[in-house]
Amino acid sequence: MAGKSIIDVLENIPREVIYTIILIAMIIPLLRPLGLPVPVSEPIKKWYDAIESLPPGSLVLISHCNLGAYPAFDSMQVATLHHLFSRPVKLVFFSIDATGLVVYDTLLSKVDPKAYGKVYGVDYFHIGYIPGGETAMKALAEDFKAAVPSDYKGTPIDQIPMAKDIKDIRDFTMIICFTSAGETSIGWIRQWIVVRPEIKYLCCVLDMMLPTMRPYYEAGQVAALTGSAPGGEYEFLIGKPGSGIKKADAFTGAQLILLVFIIIGNIASIAKRMGKGGVR
Amino acid sequence: MSVLYRRHIPLAITFICGLIILLQFFFVPANITEPWQSSLQYYGVTLTNWANLLANFIIGFGVVNISLIHARRIMRAKSWVDKFYSIWLFIVMAAFIVVGLFGYPRMWWTPLAANWDWLQLYVLTPLDATVYASLVFYMASGCYRAFRARTLEGAALLVVGFLSIMYKTPLFQAYAPWVIKTIDWIAKYPAVGAYRGIQVSAALGAILLGIRTLIGVETGYLGRRD
């Protein structure tokens, strides 16, 4: 950096420096939680209320995320499962991605259904991965048993007690989707909600996808819409603190540092232009 | 091959399949009362399930395609360094295929079930998560460089971007509720308006593309220009 003024350096901080400082800002709160407040936002309250208002015996389809996105959705999915298993509802898990089976296993290793008195095949089961994306969603909606001949372990669907009464989309009360893919979050609307608007659709996407989903939420097609980041809020709301609350401190640390970098960059940029003859 | 095989038969299949799915969507009610509705529903469901089967086939096709590309790369590479990643891809792909065939839960014989779980949990999961999580650093660096008030548009981007980051920071959610209200307003009105415009335009485009495909004007999916 020889020959460069301090303004030049601050205007173009090397990316390695940014990466390192952001990393430190994330790691410190994870190792030593700061205990910052975790306010419960409106979307999380709506998510909670939607699950809380499910009538007993309701059938809920859970389309969980793929493996790559799992760290982002971990806390929201785990908290949602805790909440769902505590309610008298039946769950059908579905992998829209080939890597989803591992996600299902990981989720159930964190949320023990037996602790809530839930039994596989009676209160919940997993239909596995069906390729095709939206055509798979359409197939499930039209003829459930034709699309799902067996569960994810190969047990014939007719041998699963709770599957005996599932015929098609009309048997479901709610879909809960966790996804990092726009075609999946919107696909459920196109293939399920448009066909049967009575179904409540709860959608959890990456925070950067929220503006894309917001028009559907405002139109009433999505009952609750949230990003993946506020998992800590949901954990706090249901009284099951987990990784999400720790991550909230890490988010604060990393994002505060990022805001500081943005301010520094702008001050340096303005100072440089003033030095060259005034701000344009 | 004659034009009949290359063009007319694929176009006819596309037209018939598309028409059945369209008719099923618009004319088959939730409670079927007429026999023709039942028939239409049956054909629609069958076609949808065929599409899922084809999706399975496409995964196999992808394996063949990627194998051909990397085999060619290995043959043409001038040094071992150039060959390394393609050879490594074959080794990993072979490992996953073999372990998957004898370890995937739905297979008829699963002596490698534990190995399959191990590969997924301790190889695929951390690799996938690492690639995904590393985006945060690129995005942070990108924000630092892009959010500069050099022009009026740049200043607007800076203000909205800055407020959006504050909106997603739990500390500000607790102590600066005005940020939540401001970004909520932006998300609810200007952003929704803009996105609706984009989405309606894209939907109209998709409808036109669908009609062109159905009537045989759009032939790009056939993979050649006739």
Image (spheres, rainbow, N blue to C red):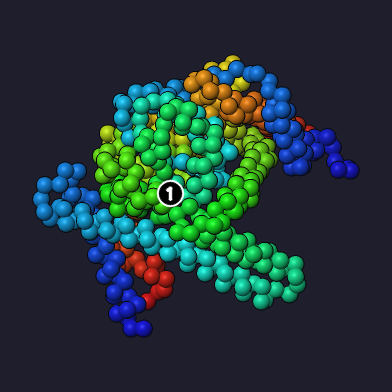
Q: Position of residue A130 (x, y in %)?
A: 41, 52
Judge by depth and name the residue closer to the eye, B104 or B203: B104
Q: Position of residue B71 (x, y in %)?
A: 61, 73
Judge by depth and name the residue closer to the eye, B179 or A197: A197
Residue B97 shows up from this direction: yes
Residue A250 occupies quadrant: top right
Work out whether A178 lies above or below B215.
above
Q: Chain of mark 1?
A: A
Q: Amino acid at mark 1?
A: Tyr
Judge by depth and name the residue closer to the eye, A102 or B23: A102
Residue at figure coordinates x 17%, y 50% from the top left: B27
Residue at figure coordinates x 60%, y 29% from the top left: A243
Q: Position of residue A226 (x, y in %)?
A: 47, 31
**Mark 1 surroundings within 10 Å by alpha-carbon count, few (fewer than 14), some (14 through 19), many (20 or more):** many
Q: Quadrant of the C terminus of chain B?
A: bottom left
Q: Position of residue A34 (x, y in %)?
A: 68, 20
The residue that label 1 is drawn on is: A152
**Going by the image, does A75 lie left or right of B52?**
right
In the image as oriented, which residue stretches furthest toward the right?
A2
**Going by the image, does A192 lie left or right of B93?**
left
